[in-house]
Image (tube, rainbow, N blue to C red):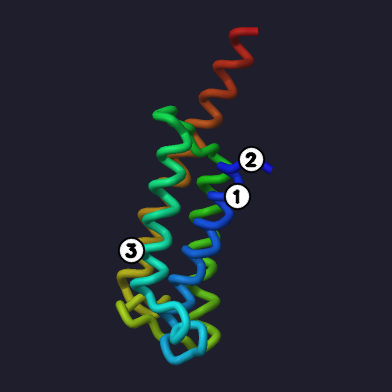
Amino acid sequence: MKLSTVLNVCIFIFFTLLFVNDFFPATTLAELLSKKIILVILIVLVCIQMMTSKGTYKKLSKKAYAGLTLYTIGLWIVLTLLGGESEIGLSYNSPIFYLIVIVLGFDLLRVYRQWKREEAEKNNVK
């Protein structure tokens, strides 16, 4: 397995742990790994990821972008439904949640249209 893949999986896991820790701060996990520790680990992992990429920019695929966006919103909803309350005010009951979902929806629509346009251009070139 490539180092970049392992780093991406670790970043994904610690991002999820940060969310869980925010919604359930009174758990054993939160006592073992505070938000500050998780944030420092995330920053270190991202820095390592940037250093190992050697300056090459890898654009996130459109499917991965959509998947991560939907995962984040889904995690937000599931943690709220499980009875968690975000310490920073994230809740699907708040108007900010709906504003963010609308903005992300428009962004996903933009990405989808861009993908379709690129596919059409590819087919026209052939």
Marks 1 and 2, how far apart in space?
A: 6 Å
- Labels 3 & 2 near each other (Cβ < 8 A): no
Q: Quadrant of residue 126?
A: top right
Pointer 3 residue:
99
Residue displayed at 49% across by 64% down: 14
Q: Is residue 20 above or below residue 9?
A: below
Res. 21 mark: none
Could you tell which of marks 3 and 1 lies nearer the N-terminus?
Answer: 1
Pointer 1 residue:
6
Marks 3 and 2, how far apart in space?
A: 38 Å
Q: Toward the viewer: 118 or 11?
A: 11
Direction right: furthest residue: 1
Residue type, numbered disc 3: Leu
- Secondary structure, mark 2, is loop
Image spot of residue 96 (x, y percent) = 31, 69
Residue type, numbered disc 1: Val
Residue displayed at 54% across by 50% down: 7
Marks 3 and 1, how far apart in space?
A: 33 Å
- Labels 1 & 2 near each other (Cβ < 8 A): yes
Q: Is residue 3 above or below residue 95?
A: above
Q: Is residue 115 above or below residue 49?
A: above
- Secondary structure, mark 3, is helix
Res. 2 mark: 2
Residue type, numbered disc 2: Lys
Q: Classify 10 Å Cα crowding around label 1: few (below 14), some (14-19), many (20 and above).
A: few
Could you tell which of marks 3 and 2 lies nearer the N-terminus?
Answer: 2
Image spot of residue 91 (x, y percent) = 39, 78
